[in-house]
Image (tube, helix red, strand yellow):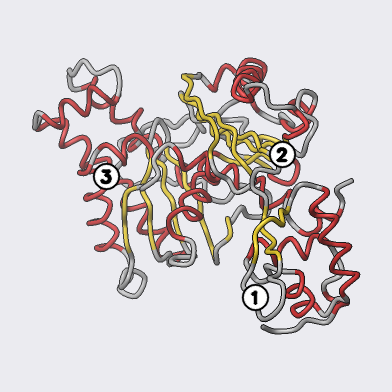
Amino acid sequence: MPRRPAAALATSGEVLRLIRAGEAVTRADIGRVTGLSRPAVSLRVTELLDRGLVVEDSEGPSTGGRPPHRLAFNASGGIVLVASLGASRAQIAVCDLAGHELARESLAVDVEEGPDVVLPLVMDTWSRLLAGRPLSQVRGVGLGVPATVEFAAGRTESARIMASWTGVAVPPIIAERFPVPVFLDNDVNVIAIGEHRAVYAGEADDLLFIKVSTRIGSGVIAGGEILRGALGAAGEIGHIPVRDGGGVLCRCGNIDCVDSVASGTAILRDLRARGHEVKTLADVVSLVRAGDAETMTVVRNAARMLGEVVASAVNLLNPAVVVLGGDVAETFQPMVSGVREVVHRRSTALSTRNLRIERSRLGPGAGIVGCAHMVLDHILSPEAVDTLA
């Protein structure tokens, strides 16, 4: 086990990081890895025990004499409140400090009703899911919303897409009721984080997640970390224009954005224009299963246009895997097959040599996992732990 100079590991937060990573599981381990003295190790471990972040209740292997006590991260030492909002549904949950779901509720919402309506609904649901747990156990809050988010400021910036959310600083609103650190990000970013952490971590650290649902968006994992860009606007794949889109006006004001011609909303619109009485994507599923030729044509055309945009992203980003999620991608295999065909035809040979294009394995739960890890990465960082009272 490598030894580090004590000066490089002088905090309780760094010791917690070692314990969580499994690099040091006894006090002796910590001393060997860090070079800290025995009293210094004891001080830091005591601080972590007092804060409920570590437990020391099982015995490690003996090397002679009394077996040492093992240190373990205490996932039950607190909880985080998370919510992943889509355009029409919300996944709201309480998770432990390892990101494991303790309670969850799925709600129908209309996110365009705005934060004055949606945020109180989310917070009321958290209070209900807490089920008698003391508020003092809550250590952080994470929220994903279907809007462009300036992550550092915790502010939504989506004037042409969801006007009611434009310029809203969400953390102060939630912190009035839950006075803990609050983190806000784009909904597809948190889904991408969740899919990567739960399915692909250590296997594929360059990942492109495409959400095809009421709208289309993407999240980019680069080198194992979410890529937000300079101000949080990375991943807005839905507003890349396509060829031969038919001149459809997008809600952002441009013409033939892939969101306006290949999303679930676009598929419903095109089928209605062809005389089909479809109200929801469930109606489209029924037509697909019945082998309706016009429905299959509409779905495949949407897949072709989406595939062209994804092919450009593959050429630019060279991901190891493209994950397709959201109601449409998870329901319609023809959509996934169509995207895969176009990407392999229009992307470079090197970028597709080992490329995998797969459907989401987590489904709606990905946003919950991603929101939880977004919060935990911050509140359990060495810097954050060291500032705890």
Residue 88 image offset from top left, x and y in percent: 46, 23
Q: Is residue 347 left or right of residue 133?
A: left
Residue 70 relative to residue 108: left or right: right
Q: At 49% from the left edge and 44% from the top edge, which residue is drawn? A: 191
Please, is residue 273 above or below residue 138 in the view? above
Q: Secondary structure at mark 2?
A: strand
Which image quadrant for residue 26? bottom right
Earlier residue among tags 2 and 3: 2
Residue that carries the numbered disc 3 in the rendered image: 303
Q: Camera-side residue: 182 or 18?
A: 18
Q: Nearer the viewer, mark 1 or mark 3?
A: 1
What residue lies at 52% left-to-right and 44% top-to-bottom? Answer: 369
| Residue 118 position in % (x across, y down) | 60, 19
- Crowdedness of circle 1 by 10 Å Cα count: few (<14), some, many (20+)? few
In terms of depth relative to the viewer, which is nearer, 75 or 116? 75
Q: Is residue 164 visible?
A: no
Q: Quadrant of the C terminus?
A: top right
Which residue in the protein does label 2 denote?
140
- Image check: 227 left or right of 264? right
* Residue at image mark 1: 62
Q: Is residue 116 above or below residue 325?
A: above
